[in-house]
Image (cartoon, helix red, strand yellow):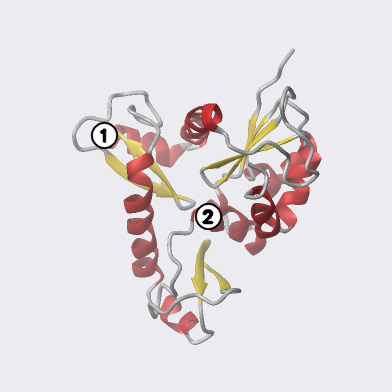
């Protein structure tokens, strides 16, 4: 029987192993987690979770273009990609303000392709003025204040629903023919469906997801050659 499992990096934060190691073919794997909810989450996990949907190509403190290898600065459970060590002081002085700047840009970028017409937490129609919440640099659109309270209490349902919506939206038009790690053909196989942020990537095994997460930038470049 084909098994579908939505498992996030929250598992990694709890049990300190890659969640890909607990999965097999035919699963759905999400690169999302409640990374910012606990001070015990390691900075490298926060970087892994936040980076795929980080919205700026400039230093958020100075406005200058980011170098090829930016400084990945984690502060208050958030990721700030910087171009210079001196920018850390600006972030330290106004974490809330710079977080809002990032989240406002996340909303602006993700809203046009947002895949849900109903609340991510309650299935209520979004209406004309939905409430936009950002969690781990991903947009979640909610219907009302009751939804916000439910979302703040437990985001699991909303994350799973949004993950499924992004996968369902992209799967019919998936352009890549091979696993980016092993370059195995994926046609006719039960694949691990993984979200790098909001981007669907299919793998032939969960072990390959673990390998991908070690150096994602390398494999993202490979992926673009596999259309």
Callout 2: helix, strand or loop?
helix
The residue drawn where x is 41% and y is 37% is: 151
Q: Does the image show residue 17?
A: no
Which quarter of the image is occupied by the C terminus?
top right
Left or right: residue 51 compared with residue 9: left
Q: Position of residue 206 (x, y in %)?
A: 77, 37
Residue 207 placement (x, y as % from top left) = 81, 41
Dot 1 falls on a residue whose secondary structure is loop
In the displayed structure image, the side of residue 209 where residue 176 appears, left or right: left
The percent position of residue 45, horizontal first and vertical second, equals: 64, 56
* Label 1 CA crowd tier, 10 Å (few <14, some 14–19, many 20+): some
The circle on residue 144 is: 1
In the image, what residue occupies the spot 28% across and 25% down? Answer: 125
Q: Quadrant of the N terminus?
A: top right
- Distance from disc 1 to disc 2, alpha carbons, whole Å, reads 23 Å
The image quarter in which residue 90 lies: bottom left
Report the residue at 62% width, 50% height from top.
224
Of residues 80 and 217, which is closer to you in this image?
A: 217
Q: Residue 36's mark?
A: 2
Between 121 and 58, the one nearer to me in the picture:
58
């Amino acid at each position: 029987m084909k098994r579908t499992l939505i498992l996030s990096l929250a598992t990694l934060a709890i049990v300190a192993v890659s969640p890909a190691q607990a999965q097999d073919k035919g699963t759905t794997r999400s690169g999302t987690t409640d990374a910012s909810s606990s001070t015990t989450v390691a900075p490298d996990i926060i970087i892994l979770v936040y980076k795929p949907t980080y919205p700026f190509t400039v230093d958020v403190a100075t406005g200058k273009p980011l170098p090829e290898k930016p400084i990945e600065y984690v502060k208050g459970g958030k990721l700030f990609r910087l171009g210079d060590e001196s920018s850390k002081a600006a972030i330290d002085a106004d974490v809330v303000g710079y977080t809002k700047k990032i989240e406002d840009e996340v909303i602006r970028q993700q809203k046009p392709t947002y895949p849900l017409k109903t609340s991510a937490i309650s299935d209520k129609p979004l209406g004309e003025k939905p409430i936009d919440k950002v969690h781990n640099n991903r947009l979640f659109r909610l219907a009302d204040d009751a939804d916000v309270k439910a979302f703040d209490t437990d985001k699991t349902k909303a994350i799973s629903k949004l993950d499924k919506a992004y996968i369902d939206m992209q799967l019919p038009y998936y352009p890549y023919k091979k696993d980016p790690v092993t370059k195995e053909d994926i046609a006719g196989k039960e694949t691990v469906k993984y979200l790098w942020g909001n981007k669907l990537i299919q793998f032939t095994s969960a072990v390959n997801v673990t390998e991908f997460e070690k150096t994602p930038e390398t494999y993202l470049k490979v992926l673009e050659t596999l259309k």
